[in-house]
Image (cartoon, grey):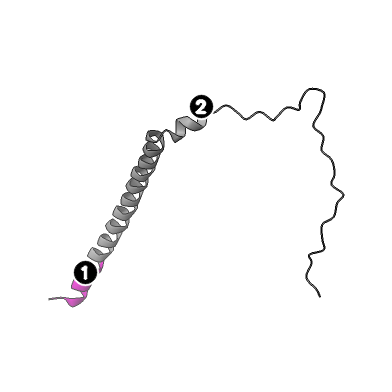
């Protein structure tokens, strides 16, 4: 029996086994990702969160009472000095 030829055959089989294991792992991870993505999407749709967000009208800014207008005013009041002592 030729030991070098046996070792070469074992190495070749190991390389194929490693290749197919990597291919199977990549395919399994991709299928798992797609299943998880679909499950999350279906869960959001089933809980009505997806529809609820679309059904709420956009929030309108508040309007000022009649005779008044909203103005941004700078607050010149300075608070107490809270910086730590050096």
* Frontmost residue, 55 versus 67: 67
Q: Earlier in the sequence, mark 2 or mark 1?
A: 1
Instruction: Please report the residue visible at 79 percent of the width from the left and 67 percent of the height from the top.
Output: 83
Q: Which residues are magenta?
A: 1-11
**86 to the left or right of 37:** right
* Frontmost residue, 37 versus 74: 74
Instruction: Please report the residue visible at 36 percent of the width from the left and 45 percent of the height from the top.
Output: 36
Instruction: Please report the residue visible at 82 percent of the width from the left and 27 percent of the height from the top.
Output: 68
Tag of residue 10: 1
**Looking at the rendering, which quadrant does residue 56 occupy?**
top right
Residue at the outermost left position: 1
Instruction: Specify the principal SS of the magenta part.
Output: helix
In this view, the mark in front (2 or 1): 2
On-image quarter of the C terminus: bottom right
Compared to 77, does 17 lie above or below?
below
Residue 71: x %, y % from top left: 82, 34
In the rendered structure, does residue 2 fall within the stretch colored magenta?
yes
Instruction: Please report the residue visible at 25 percent of the width from the left and 65 percent of the height from the top.
Output: 14
Q: Which residue carries the number 2 mark?
A: 55
Q: How many numbered dots are placed on residues in this image?
A: 2
Compared to 46, does 19 lie above or below?
below
Tag of residue 82: none
Q: Residues within 10 Å of mark 1 (few under 14, many from 20)?
A: few
Residue 27: x %, y % from top left: 32, 49
- In what element is the residue under mark 1? helix
**64 to the left or right of 35:** right
């Amino acid at each position: 029996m030729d030991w070098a030829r046996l070792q070469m055959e074992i190495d070749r089989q190991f390389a194929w086994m490693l290749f197919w294991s990597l291919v199977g792992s990549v395919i399994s991870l991709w299928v798992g990702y797609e299943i998880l993505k679909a499950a999350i999407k279906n869960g959001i749709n089933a809980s009505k969160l997806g529809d609820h967000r679309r059904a709420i009208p956009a929030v309108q800014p508040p309007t000022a009472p009649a005779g008044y207008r909203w103005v941004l005013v700078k607050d010149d009041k300075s608070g107490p000095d809270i910086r730590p002592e050096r």
